[in-house]
Amino acid sequence: MNGNLKLAIQKKGRLTEKSLELLRHCGLDIENYSERLIVSVRNFPLDILFLRDDDIPEYVQDGVADIGIVGENVIYEKQTQTTMLEKLGFGRCSLMLAYPENKELKKIEDINGRIIATTYPRILKDYLGSNNLNAKIIELSGSVEIAPSLGVADLICDIVSTGNTLMMNKLKKSFKVFDSEAVLISAASSLSDEKKNDMLNDLLRRIRSVLTARSSKYLMMNVPKNSLEKIINIIPSLKSPTVLHLADANMLAVHAVIPSNKFWSIIEDLKAAGASGILLLPIENMIQ
Ligand code: PRT
Ligand code: ZN
């Protein structure tokens, strides 16, 4: 026991690279991890444990790892005692009901009496229960999408991201059961070891600043002096924009941090108000 904070992430799968990328953006210098179960971070008291994603909730609950990064779908399905500390904005997907293209499913009640194959029996059972539905659940460990063509099930309930897998198997998606993304979890909202709790708070501050930076962009433009007020009213700035003088006395430079997803909806209004030389830059880090 070296007293380091222990973080469990997926060893090899869809969440591995994004989890490591997030940690690196937090300034962590991570040793080459290939095929190792545990690696230390060189410049932060953190050990990273590489595990199968299905095992992460239980290891965190039991204190083998202090914190973990895993999909909400896995947490919900495993029903362990863990607390979600932060949504991480990657690994987004939905658990959805899907059925063969040549069949009809007009309303959700049409699944009553049908057989649904899934790797998420608990989530599906809750969904059926809370919607007063009565279907039979068959639990499979993988390749759920081929169950209808094998005649094993009428429908499936599986993770959908792009929808390509469903299409390739001649299935169409219907009702959504659950939305998921990768989240950071711990056994309780604060750790009992005070030193580790300080480390966790430091790490959380860094993660939150990276996440805020990712969802924001730095907007720069030149504007005619007499359009300043109009332009400022268009900008969905998080704080008051910065206004700078230019060599041309009739023009000003305006800089602002904006939510990334707002850019395309304001660009035409900015141009119409006389803005020129519009630049949108990524932000590396943002401390609030
Ligand atoms: O080996 P280990 O048990 O660790 O990995 P795993 O195979 O169980 O998990 P993995 O790596 O496939 O997924 C890890 C997590 O990523 C999941 O628990 C989800 O939270 C999240 N995630 C995001 C996804 C997807 N997108 C996804 N598309 N998990 C699975 N899929 C699969 C889905 O099951 C289906 O087979 O991809 C297929 C559908 O994808 P589309 O793009 O064709 O719709
Ligand atoms: Zn898994």
Image (cartoon, helix red, strand yellow):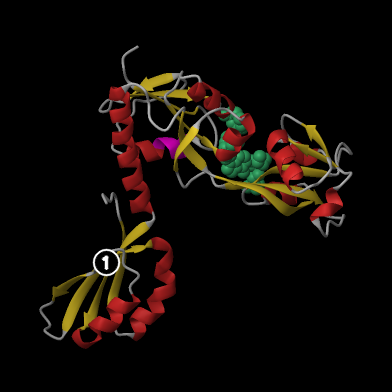
For the question of whether residue 25 can be seen, the reply is no
Q: Nearer the viewer, residue 54 or 164?
A: 54
Give the quadrant of ligand 1.
top right
Q: Which residue is found at the position 15% from the left and 73% from the top? A: 244
Task: Decide if residue 214 is on the left or right side of residue 180.
Answer: left
Q: Quadrant of the N terminus?
A: top left
| Residue 98 screen position, x and y as percent | 76, 49
For the question of whether residue 84 can be seen, the reply is yes
| Furthest residue in direction top, as rendered | 1
Does residue 175 sit above or below 37 in this rendering? below
Task: Decide if residue 10 is on the left or right side of residue 107.
Answer: left
| Residue 256 screen position, x and y as percent | 27, 66
Q: Give the crowd class for mark 1: few <14, some 14-19, many >=20 residues within 10 Å.
A: many
**Is ligand 1 less than 8 Å from the beta carbon at label 1?**
no
Q: Which residue is found at the position 32% from the left and 20% from the top? A: 4
* Residue 17 included in the magenta stretch of the image: yes
Q: Nearer the viewer, residue 53 or 176?
A: 176
Residue flagged by tag 1: what amino acid is it? Ala
Residue 192 in which image quadrant: top left
Span of residues in magenta: 16-20
Does residue 284 sit above or below 72 in this rendering? below
Q: Which residue is found at the position 76% from the left and 31% from the top? A: 140
Task: Decide if residue 15 is on the left or right side of residue 102.
Answer: left
* Residue 271 included in the magenta stretch of the image: no
In this figure, which residue is indicated by the disc labeled 1?
256
| Residue 201 screen position, x and y as percent | 31, 34
| Residue 283 screen position, x and y as percent | 30, 54
Does dot 1 land on a helix, a strand or a loop? strand
Q: How many marks?
A: 1
Most common secondary structure along the magenta stretch: helix
Q: Nearer the viewer, residue 65 or 154?
A: 65
